[in-house]
């Protein structure tokens, strides 16, 4: 997982996504695998986040 320009181990075999603090996802929002939502991200209901 990239963080501050470096790869950081997660200790997991699989990683869904990382959601920043204060983010708000609308109902039925789909976040694709491996995506990173920055802090404070807002999505609309039913949207697909491809980030």
Image (spheres, rainbow, N blue to C red):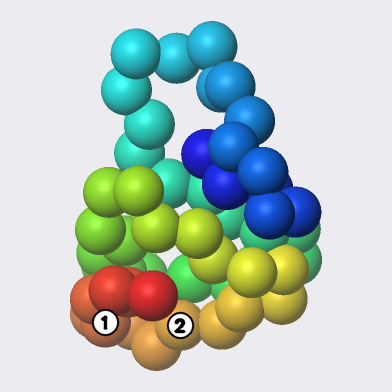
Where is residue 16 drawn, in percent x and y?
A: 35, 39
Q: Position of residue 31 (x, y in %)?
A: 31, 61
Choose between 12 and 23: the one closer to the eye. Answer: 12
Where, by quadrant of the figure, is residue 26 drawn?
Answer: bottom left
Q: Is residue 38 left or right of residue 25?
A: right
Identify whether 15 is placed above or below 49: above
Name the residue rendered at 57%, 47% in the picture.
2
6 is higher (above) or lower (below) than 26? above
Q: Is 10 on the left-hand or right-hand side of 5?
A: left
Above or below, comparing residue 41 to residue 18 in the picture = below
Residue 18: image location, x then y, percent: 53, 48
Q: Secondary structure at mark 2?
A: loop
Position above or below: 7 against 12: below
User: Which residue is the site of mark 1?
Assistant: 47
Image coordinates for residue 19, horizontal then vertical, percent: 57, 54
The residue that disc 2 covers is: 43
List the single residue furthest toward the bottom: 44
Disc 1 and disc 2 in contact, CB within 8 angstroms: yes
The residue sitting at 58% across, 22% down in the picture is 9
């Amino acid at each position: 997982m990239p963080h501050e320009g470096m790869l950081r181990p997660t200790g997991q075999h699989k990683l869904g996504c990382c959601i920043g603090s204060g983010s708000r996802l609308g109902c039925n929002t789909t976040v694709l695998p491996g995506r990173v939502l920055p802090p404070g991200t807002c999505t609309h209901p039913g949207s697909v986040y491809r980030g």
